[in-house]
């Protein structure tokens, strides 16, 4: 059993690092200002936004037990902190986890 787990970890690690390596090798000729690069950037951000929206609107697990109002308040506060901290993602992420825990415990 231990050998199978090691084999699975090895194969998934190779697949991950191989795809990253191929991305680095193939990206040498792509300019950051090109239309295709901007399109992929927009695609990545829109996918991330859709996933976050799905987690907030249709949560599963423990998050589904928290009211929509509490989630909405945490989102608004986190977005405000995001702009206050000059678009830093670390502070709003930590802040949202702490505030969501406090609100879910006391509200």
Image (spheres, rainbow, N blue to C red):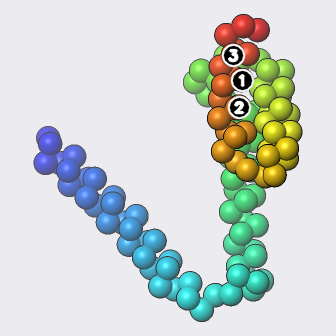
Query: Eyeballing the image, is 93 above or below 34?
Result: above
- Classify mark 3: residues with Cα within 10 Å, few (<14), some (14-19) or many (20+): few
Query: Eyeballing the image, is 105 above or below 13?
Result: above
From this viewpoint, is residue 64 visible? no
Query: Eyeballing the image, is 105 above or below 55?
Result: above
- Residue receiving disc 1: 99
Discs 2, 1 touching: Cβ within 8 Å: yes
- Residue receiving disc 3: 102
From the viewer's perspective, tell me whether residue 3 is left or right of residue 24: left
Residue at image coords 69%, 16%:
102
Discs 2, 3 touching: Cβ within 8 Å: no
Discs 3, 1 touching: Cβ within 8 Å: yes
Residue at image coords 22%, 46%:
5
Give x and y (percent) for residue 100. Answer: 70, 23
Mark 2 vs mark 1, CA separation in Å:
5 Å
- Return the disc, 2 or 3, that comes first in the chain's sequence: 2
Give x and y (percent) for residue 17. Answer: 38, 68
Q: Quadrant of the C terminus?
A: top right
In which quadrant of the rendered view does residue 39 lie? bottom right
In which quadrant of the rendered view does residue 28 lie? bottom right
Determine whether the residue tagged by mark 3 lies in a helix, strand or loop.
helix
Q: Quadrant of the N terminus?
A: top left
Give x and y (percent) for residue 93. Answer: 67, 39
Give x and y (percent) for residue 29. Answer: 60, 92
**Residue furthest top in the image:** 106
Q: Nearer the viewer, residue 23 or 94?
A: 94
- Residue receiving disc 2: 96
Mark 3 vs mark 1, CA separation in Å:
5 Å
Mark 2 vs mark 3, CA separation in Å:
10 Å
In which quadrant of the rendered view does residue 10 lie? bottom left
Residue at image coords 71%, 31%:
96
From this viewpoint, is residue 14 visible? yes
């Amino acid at each position: 059993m231990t050998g199978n787990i090691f084999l699975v970890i090895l194969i998934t690690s190779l697949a991950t690092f191989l795809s990253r390596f191929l991305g680095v090798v193939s990206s040498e000729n792509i300019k950051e200002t090109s239309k295709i690069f901007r399109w992929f950037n927009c695609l990545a951000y829109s996918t991330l936004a859709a996933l976050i929206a799905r987690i907030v609107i249709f949560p599963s697990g423990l998050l589904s037990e928290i009211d929509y109002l509490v989630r909405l308040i945490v989102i608004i506060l986190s977005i405000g902190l995001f702009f206050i901290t000059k678009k830093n993602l670390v502070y709003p992420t930590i802040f949202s986890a702490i505030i969501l825990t406090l609100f879910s415990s006391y509200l």
